Every structure is written in structure tokens, then in C-alpha cells.
Amino acid sequence: MGDRCWIDEALERQGLLFDAKGRARRIDAPLAPVADTHAHLSMLGPDSDGAKVPSRASLEAAAVALARAWLVGVTWVVSIADASEDARDPAAYLDWLSAVEERAHEEIEAALAAGIVPAFPDEPLRVSLSAGVHPYGAADVDDEALGRLRLIASDRRCVALGEMGLDYHCDVDRELQRAAFERQLALAVELGLPVELHVRDATGDAELVAHRDAFEVVEASGIRDRGIDLHCYTLGPDAMAPWVGLGAKVAFGGALTFKRSDEIREAAGRCPSEAPITETDSPYMAPEPFRGRPSEPALALATAWRVVEARAGTDASSEATFRALWKNARALF
Ligand SMILES: [Zn+2]
């Protein structure tokens, strides 16, 4: 991969993949299509955090980000919709996402016309969505919110419910969180959809109580047969083991690439080949060497290469790991 390639060209022509200091950074081309299984597309625009309806600015930003992602080989993006935040008005969110897709295709056409060669010209751009209520919004999980989730779930692009879960790092009452989590899991079981889980322990909690409680709730829910995505995995191999035993996919994002993340890399290196998947959690947690700037789906490629590195000790070739990451995401959703 020493030669000049399409990505260099894309960098120059499109300002693709710049780091926090504005320097163009090269990432090797992927060896199989890459999935970003968790991106907050509506938050990519300026001032969009906390917006109840996605803004016009976020439409442009999300469309350009999707086009860039597709060009570098991140051909599938799962957008996270929150029924108490950006998707409080389900119809408005779904219309917005349709408009984003349409604009992304225009951007892609423009890039192709400019001579940029995409990583996988025959792979379509896939945009899916997952709808839930984050544990921060647990107090909002009532019949009406569940009705909104049902509405979003009836859209053909909806492949999962979530993010949902337990966050003991925040001050939201734990019993309230648990009840909101259980109700959403029950809905996912009813609808036959897998779930994206957000589980975060309190600062310095060596007992990992949030993970322990979440595991108990998940085990009792019957969601195991539908499928589980343990979003934003930030622990080591030991904490991962019981989840893998439940058949969960373990989603690795930017955190895996950070300097002090040896434990996470060890988990990625040791999980069975059918477990790992990639994500970004855009606009948060941009992977190295992009840390410090807002993340976007294209950067899942940087994380995918670090997962490959972490798994270099296994028998799997780089290409086999890329294929497994893609296949695992396809299998779950
Ligand atoms: Zn998220």
C-alpha cells in the first residue's frame, strides 16, 4: 500500500479526513467494506446537540459525512435516533434522514464526476437507523415515548432499538433507568429487533456495577435471541466474557485507539471472531490520529485498522478481520 492511492486524491480534492489540527491524515484503504454501527448523524452539524428536531445545518453536515464515509469504504452507517431528543417528532426525523440520504447521493455523484475513485464502487451506500431513549432520558420513557419508538421501528430502515441501557456515571435515578431499560427491551423482544446497549459504570467503580446490573436485566429479558450490540466497549477482556457468552457483538470505537487503551485492545484481540464490530459514536470519541476533532462515520476506517492490529496475534489475516467485522454487523442487524 505504498503507492499513491485514491484516498490521497480524495484528501486533496475534498478535504477528506483531516485531524484536529487541520492536517490531512492518510489511512490505508480498507480490505472489505466497513460499518459504522453507531453514529449520531443529527448531531454532526454545528449547535445541534440537544436539538429536538434535526437542523438544516445538520442535514448538510450529515450528508457530506455520509458521502465521505462511502468514498473511503465505510459503506453502511446506522444512525442513532433518540425518541426523547432528536427524534421526539418521529416523522420529522424520518423525513430529515431521507433528505440526508438524498443529499449524500448528490455529493457522491459530484465526487465521482470529479474523478474520485471510491473504495467499493459496487457497494451501495446503506443508511439504517436504531431508535431508543438514552438512559439520560429515562424519566421520559412512558407510553407515548414507546409509541414513538414503535412508529420509528415501522420504518424500513430501522434495524434495531437503542441506544438504551444503564449509565451510573450520571445522576439519573438508577431504579428509573432500570425501568426505562426494561420497557425498551420488552418492546425490542416484541418487535423482534436487536438492541444497541449503552452501559457506563460510575467513575472509579472497580466492581462495574452498571455492567453487572445491565447483564442481569438483559439476561432476564429474552433479547438474547434477537441480538445485542454492546456499544462503545471500553473495558478489558474479563468484563467482556459474559456478554460474549450471551452472543453479544462488541462494538469498538475511538476509545480502542487511545494511547492508554491497552485493555480495550486486549479485549479486541481476544474476543471470538464472530463478536467484534466497528462504530464511531460520532460526533464523539474520534479515533487516533483524529482525536480532538468531531468524529464522523468515515473515521470507523481508522478504528477498523486498529482492530486488525489488535487481532494480529490471532490466526486471522488482516483481510479476514476486515471481513469478520463487516459480516458480524450484517449478521446482527
Ligand atoms: Zn451514542
Image (cartoon, helix red, strand yellow):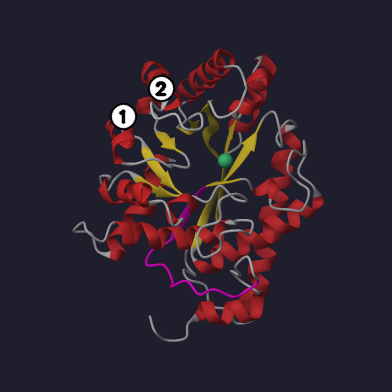
Q: What element carries label 1?
A: loop
Q: Which quarter of the rendering shows the C terminus?
A: top left
Whether residue 305 is in magenta: the answer is no
Residue 84, image x and y in percent? 69, 28
Q: Residue 144: where, in percent of width, then height?
A: 69, 18
Contact? badges 1 and 2 (CB < 8 Å): yes
**Residue 18 coordinates in the image, percent (x, y):** 61, 70
Can residue 248 be seen by looking at this rendering?
yes
Q: Label 1 belongs to which residue?
A: 246
| Magenta segment | 22-37
Numbered circles on residues, count: 2
Q: Pick out the residue farthest to the front.
A: 204
Residue denoted by label 2: 218
Under mark 2, the amino acid is: Val
Instruction: Pick the residue in front: 117 or 286.
Output: 286
Q: Mark 2: which secondary structure?
A: helix
Q: Where in the figure is residue 134, as x and y percent of width and height? A: 60, 30
Residue drawn at x 46%, y 68% is 120
Which residue appears farthest toward the right when viewing the image? 56
Q: In this view, does 280 lie to the left or right of 152?
A: left
> Is residue 177 positioned above or below 255 on the image?
above
Q: Earlier in the sequence, mark 1 or mark 2?
A: 2
